[in-house]
Structures are given as structure tokens and as C-alpha cells.
């Protein structure tokens, strides 16, 4: 390769610079044009297909990613060919040296990412626009499912790039139904019957104000309307009894319904004079008289 560069520099001339420069610009412009036209063609092709919007966007990003990698690879090879017309890449790519070993490891990782990404899409684990939690850690909205990576945008705006092969568990909040589960703890001094009445009122308010976010069946009836599930714990931190409210919601209303239930419990409890449990510390005043203790021991 060094000989090729030496020969190229020795034969350098204004005409050669213009010729090679024009070829480079032509290749770059052709790559840019292919990426733009390819993106439009792919999007229009999937627009006429009968596919769910989320899955359609996922397939668009996946195919676009594949086209982008192919265009980059072809453009890189053409650029090398411009400057080194007689240069053969095969010996380097097939070599047994350090470069060949690095390429081999890189190919293994790439193949693993691609295969994992294929099964993620084939099994409908997530789509673009879904709100998910990956590996019990990163939580946010799926922005792109690429050939090698999946990008997640957290609620705070941070964007995460995760290799497809690194995705082990997917918790998807955008499937047909979700169950809102809200727990509230009340001190042992409160009457459980009064608490139950309070929570029944909360459920009635949520049914009325958030009816559009509650899941319904084919007949328009609530699948699982807001209801008091009952006492789910009476020993948590020794603070009191825990009551739980449940309701099945649509994916887009899941968080809103949970927030509304919590707020309504707080407001109604204050209006009725019912206390919510909180950590308490009991101090005992024990007076010990060392002198008297010694006197008793001596006696």
C-alpha cells in the first residue's frame, strides 16, 4: 500500500487532482442522493402496506439502517478505488494478521447484533414509539430500531444507544392493556371501614373523570373498572395497613390514571380527616439512677 501512495504522490499533477477530486465529489453526492431517495422510497413503500403504525415505523428504521450501511460500504470501496485503482482489498480482509483478527471479532459482534435485532422485530417485542424498560434499567420511548442498535429517549431527554445483542429483557408499556396498581397505607388507628368507604369514593371519581382512559370490551363496558382490591399488607414498616386500588387502562392513559388515583386519595383523605401513614419514631424516657443501683447491689 505504501508503494501505491508513493507512486500516487510522484505522479501528482493539477489535472490528476481535479480528476480525483471530481470523482470523490461524485461518489459523495451519489451516496447522499441514494440515502435520501432510498429513505423516501422505503417510507412510501411501507405507507401503502397494511401494518400497524408502530410496527411500520420500526420496519422503516430497520430497512433504512440496512440501506445506510450498504451505501456507506460501497462508497468507502469506491473512494479507495479512486485513489488506488490497482489496489486489491482481498488480501487485507482475508489476512491472518492482527487486522484480520479484529475484522473477524467485529463481524461476530455485528452478526450477533443483526440476528438479535431480527428476532426482536419478528417477535414484536417493541416498536418505534413504544414506552419500554430495557434490562430493568433504561426506561423511555423507542425512537429507532436499527440494524445494529436500538435508541431509547428517556423522559428527561437523554438518549441511549443500546446494541441489539445487549438487550436481554424488554418491559413494554404499550401493549393492549395495562393494570394501574396504586397502594396507600393508613395508620392502624384509622377504622378500616372508613378507609374502604373513602377509597370507594375515589374509584367512583376516577370512573367518571377518566372514563376515556379505562379499558373497555367490545360492548363498551369497563373490563376492570377502578376498584378497591382490599388490604394487601398490614405490616409494611410497621406503619399501618396497606390498601390497593386497581384498574385496567389503555396504554396511553396508564400513567395519568395512576397519578389521578394518588392525588384523589390524598385530597379525599384530608377532607375526611383520615390520616395517611408516614414513618414515626417513638422515644421512651427511661431514668436510671446509677447511685441507687449501686446502693442496692451493696445492700
Image (tube, grey):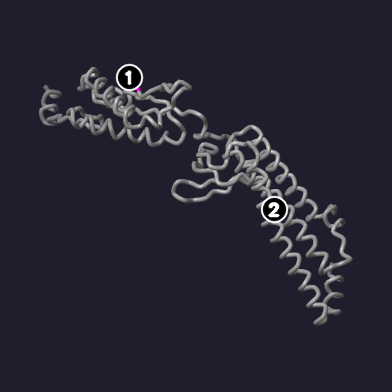
Q: Quadrant of the N terminus?
A: bottom right
Disc with the residue nearer the chain's start (2 vs 1): 2
Instruction: Give 204 or 147, whichever is nearer the viewer.
Output: 204
Q: Is residue 103 left or right of residue 188?
A: right
Q: Is residue 24 left or right of residue 159?
A: right
Please state the extent of the stretch shown in magenta in the rendering: 227-231
Instruction: Give 81 or 276, whichever is nearer the viewer.
Output: 81
Pick out the residue farthest to the bottom: 14
Q: Residue 299: x, y in percent? A: 11, 21
Residue occupying image coordinates x 67% and y 48%: 42
Residue occupying image coordinates x 42% and y 35%: 253
Kindly state the secondary structure of the residue where label 1 is placed.
strand
Which residue position holds label 2?
A: 38
Q: Residue 247: x, y in percent? A: 39, 25
Q: Is residue 106 left or right of residue 83?
A: left
Residue occupying image coordinates x 77% and y 48%: 104
Which residue position holds label 1?
A: 231
Residue occupying image coordinates x 58% and y 37%: 126
Amino acid at each position: 500500500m505504501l508503494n501505491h501512495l508513493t507512486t500516487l504522490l510522484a505522479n501528482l499533477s493539477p489535472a490528476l487532482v481535479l480528476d480525483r477530486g471530481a470523482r470523490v465529489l461524485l461518489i459523495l453526492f451519489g451516496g447522499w442522493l441514494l440515502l435520501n431517495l432510498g429513505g423516501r422510497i422505503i417510507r412510501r413503500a411501507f405507507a401503502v402496506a397494511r401494518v400497524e403504525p408502530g410496527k411500520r415505523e420500526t420496519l422503516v428504521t430497520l430497512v433504512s439502517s440496512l440501506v445506510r450501511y450498504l451505501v456507506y460500504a460501497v462508497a468507502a470501496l469506491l473512494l479507495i478505488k479512486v485513489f488506488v485503482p490497482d489496489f486489491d482489498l482481498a488480501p487485507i480482509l482475508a489476512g491472518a494478521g492482527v487486522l484480520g483478527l479484529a475484522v473477524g471479532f467485529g463481524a461476530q459482534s455485528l452478526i450477533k447484533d443483526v440476528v438479535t435485532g431480527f428476532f426482536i422485530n419478528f417477535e414484536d417485542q417493541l416498536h418505534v414509539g413504544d414506552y419500554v424498560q430495557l434490562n430493568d434499567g433504561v426506561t423511555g420511548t423507542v425512537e429507532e430500531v436499527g440494524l445494529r442498535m436500538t435508541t431509547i429517549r428517556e423522559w428527561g431527554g437523554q438518549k441511549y444507544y443500546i446494541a441489539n445483542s445487549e438487550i436481554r429483557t424488554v418491559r413494554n408499556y404499550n401493549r393492549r392493556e395495562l393494570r394501574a396498581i396504586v397502594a396507600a397505607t393508613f395508620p392502624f388507628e384509622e377504622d378500616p371501614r372508613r378507609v374502604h368507604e373513602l377509597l370507594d369514593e375515589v374509584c367512583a371519581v376516577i370512573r367518571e373523570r377518566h372514563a376515556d382512559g379505562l379499558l373497555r370490551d367490545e360492548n363498551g363496558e369497563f373490563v376492570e373498572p377502578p376498584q378497591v382490591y382490599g388490604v394487601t399488607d398490614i405490616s409494611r414498616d410497621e406503619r399501618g395497613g396497606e390498601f390497593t386500588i386497581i384498574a385496567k387502562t389503555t396504554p396511553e392513559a396508564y400513567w395519568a390514571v395512576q397519578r389521578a388515583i394518588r392525588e384523589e386519595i390524598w385530597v379525599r383523605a384530608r377532607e375526611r380527616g383520615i390520616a395517611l401513614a408516614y414513618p414515626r419514631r417513638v422515644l421512651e424516657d427511661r431514668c436510671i439512677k446509677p447511685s441507687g443501683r449501686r446502693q442496692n447491689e451493696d445492700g
